[in-house]
Image: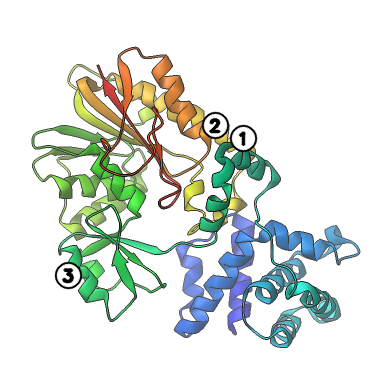
Amino acid sequence: MNSRRIALKIFEEGISHSFISKDLWKLTDPLSKADRDFVRKIVYGTIRFLFAIDREVDSLLKEPRKTPKNVRNILRLGVYEIFETHVPVYATVNEYTQIAPQKLKGLVNAVLREISKSADKTKLSPSLPNWLYNILEKDLGKDMNIFLDKSKGHELSLRAVKMERKELLNELFSVVDCYPMNYSPWGVICKKGANLENDSFRRGNFTFQDESSQLVGISISPKPGEKILDACGGVGTKTSHLVQIERKANVIYNDVNKLKMSAARSNFQRLGLFPEKMMSFDVLKYEAGSGDQFDKVLVDAPCTALGTLGKHPDLLLRLNQSDVEEKAKIQLKMLEKLWNAIRPRGELVYSVCTVTKAETDDVIFKFLSQHKDAVAIDPFDGEFPFDFNGLGVQLLKHMEGFYISKIKRL
């Protein structure tokens, strides 16, 4: 099976389920590294530009709605390849014509040939659903182009754990082009894609974590003896970072999802970084008791995750307009539920990997307006050149789209 047939299979499954799982990428295992990279590029690339591609395709079809799904998907991949790769056009047209159904080979050939006539003169435009584009254009203003540019791709980010960052850079030197992160002293960025789930990874020398995510631990700044709750611990990445920063802090992991808890245990074991305790309560149903007083609480809340579009473009397949408002309500409720679990003079750090105003500044503004015993402070105490607007910090200008707010209890 050639690479384009595999790409079509992965793409069709992704479109059908609005999600591309790790298992789907296993279909590329028999391919060479170059072909695996090619498949990933055209699948994710087609999704990134899907709405723009559909406009191009529909303009050349007499009855777009009657076009069979498999043919439309072949055309989608072909259009992306023509516009965004250096493969000769004749080869692209021929390959996709070959995998089309016998009765519709002529249609695929004709549409792709017509598309190719304009490929040298124009580029695919940024591709977001209209409702999302309108929201982000309003919320981001002049930073909209930064967001669109970063949504086109994402470099691999690591956190050194069982070795110093300098050692990790030296170890990876022969495998992939890497360089130190600007703000995280543990962070490494790898420019080119590579499969780094190798022996060094399995030994816990490093783990995968974006720089913005590492800045959450820096913002919390755990101290010896502090009781710290990671309320939405997920697979334990931020929990393990807190333990790494300060081994003498009493870090407590929590997540209501049993599968994530299982993954977190595996990660703690691999990294040799264990929280003081693992809990599994639903934050939205939580009622703080007299013994549940924490010095610091991290609320890494569920969100629309728009800051991760560069590495998870399939997010666009499942995101709806109502998600923004619904996530914002959940986020605010989580802060309300956990506030009474924080000791006087204690701190709550709120983080989300997204860029909508509704899920960032608006959530914090609403929370502060309802709590006279709360005040937002600079998450980094002026240490970094980030713009603290009195509510929080949006990191989009410096790295991936990510928001951090730090609230002190008076």
The x and y percentages for residue 308 are 47, 52
Q: Residue at x 78, y 76 (%)?
A: 112
> Dot 3, crowdedness within 10 Å: few (<14), some or many (≥20)?
few
In the rendered structure, are the residues bearing label 2 and label 3 in contact, judged by CB atoms less than 8 Å apart?
A: no
**For this view, does 16 lie left or right of residue 241?**
right
**For this view, does 254 lie left or right of residue 119?**
left
Extreme right residue here?
62
**Front position among marks 3 and 1:** 3
Residue 261 is at least partly visible in this image: yes
**Front position among marks 2 and 3:** 3
Dot label at residue 231 = none
Mark 2: secondary structure: helix
**For this view, does 357 lie left or right of residue 182?**
right
At label 2, which amino acid type do we have?
Answer: Glu
At label 3, which amino acid type do we have?
Answer: Glu
Cα separation, mark 2 vs mark 3, equals 44 Å
Residue beneath label 1, please? 322
User: Quadrant location of residue 123?
Assistant: bottom right
